[in-house]
Amino acid sequence: MCGIVGYIGTAQAAPILLDGLSKLEYRGYDSAGIAVYDGKEIHVKKAAGRLKVLSELTHDGATMPGTLGIGHTRWATHGSPSDINAHPHYNKGETITVVHNGIIENYLKLKKKLQDKGYEFLSETDTEVLAHLLDYYYKGNPIEAITKVMHRVEGSYALGIIFKEFPDTLYAVRKDSPLIVGKASDGNLIASDVPAVLKYTREVYFIQNEEIAALKTDSIIFYNVDSEEIQKTSTTIEWDINAAEKAATSISC
Ligand code: GLU
């Protein structure tokens, strides 16, 4: 555990990511990070410690321009709480960037396979396996790469993923870790929990196990683990934001 936020739209992503992560602080965390795509490069900033450290590092997001981004608060399960182990993680060349909540149970086996194929690991996390495995399976179709990874990994995950070759799409998938999609007027969001998106929208899709979402600024397409498109119905959240935040404080990772 513990928190994921993602945004694609017409507004600047970084301030939305930092704001969303602040709404997930109740879940507990030891480090935080964001990745923002400016259309040329995917820029990553991450740091052990409180969200405040990341906010200061990025001048409240101002130093990271771009309208597509993913953010993460980490509750370390594999590897110490350090800058290097903080998410996002990425492949060589930083063309695929991932945030992950959960635990990849068979990561050692996968890490060995990838190392044998020449992949180099920077962190001690189970999560980094996902970035390299996506790279291994990626042949130009993100959904195909994501479903191949889903078939290979054992454990729990909620993921936000950016592919450099797809600057207009934010990918998300989950199994046994929470993830929702919010449909807003100036873009779309992903988050671990509803309070992170309530400032922007009340229209939410609850992602079920092994469902994938591909979000663009003005559309959301859902897929199953066989890469087939599926239809989902959104829910209108009726709670008020203060009540939601109060309720949220009683839950933790
Ligand atoms: N297992 C991952 C790690 O230790 C993700 C932890 C989380 O859910 O924050 O980095």
Image: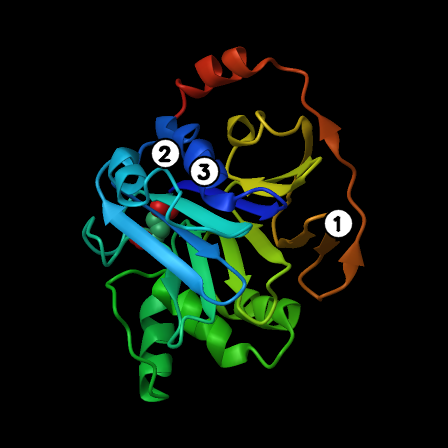
Q: Earlier in the sequence, mark 3 or mark 1?
A: 3
Contact between labelled residues 1 and 2, with CB atoms less than 8 Å apart: no
- Amino acid under label 3? Pro
Query: Which residue bears the numbered disc 3?
Result: 15
Say which mark, if any, is on residue 138. Answer: none
- Amino acid under label 2? Cys
Query: Which residue bears the numbered disc 2?
Result: 253
Q: Is residue 155 visible?
A: no
Q: Quadrant of residue 229?
A: bottom right
Q: Is residue 42 visible?
A: yes
For this orientation, the residue located farthest to the bottom is 117
- Amino acid under label 1? Ser
Q: Secondary structure at mark 2?
A: loop
Query: Which residue bears the numbered disc 1?
Result: 219
Looking at the rendered structure, the number of numbered marks drawn on it comes to 3
User: Residue drawn at (25%, 64%), measured in percent from left and top?
Assistant: 123
Instruction: Give the CA distance from mark 2 to mark 1.
Output: 31 Å
- How crowded is the residue under tag 2: few (<14 C-alpha within 10 Å), some, or many (20+)? few
User: Residue drawn at (70%, 58%), measured in percent from left and top?
Assistant: 224
- Confirm or reject: label 2 Cβ below 8 Å from ligand 1: yes
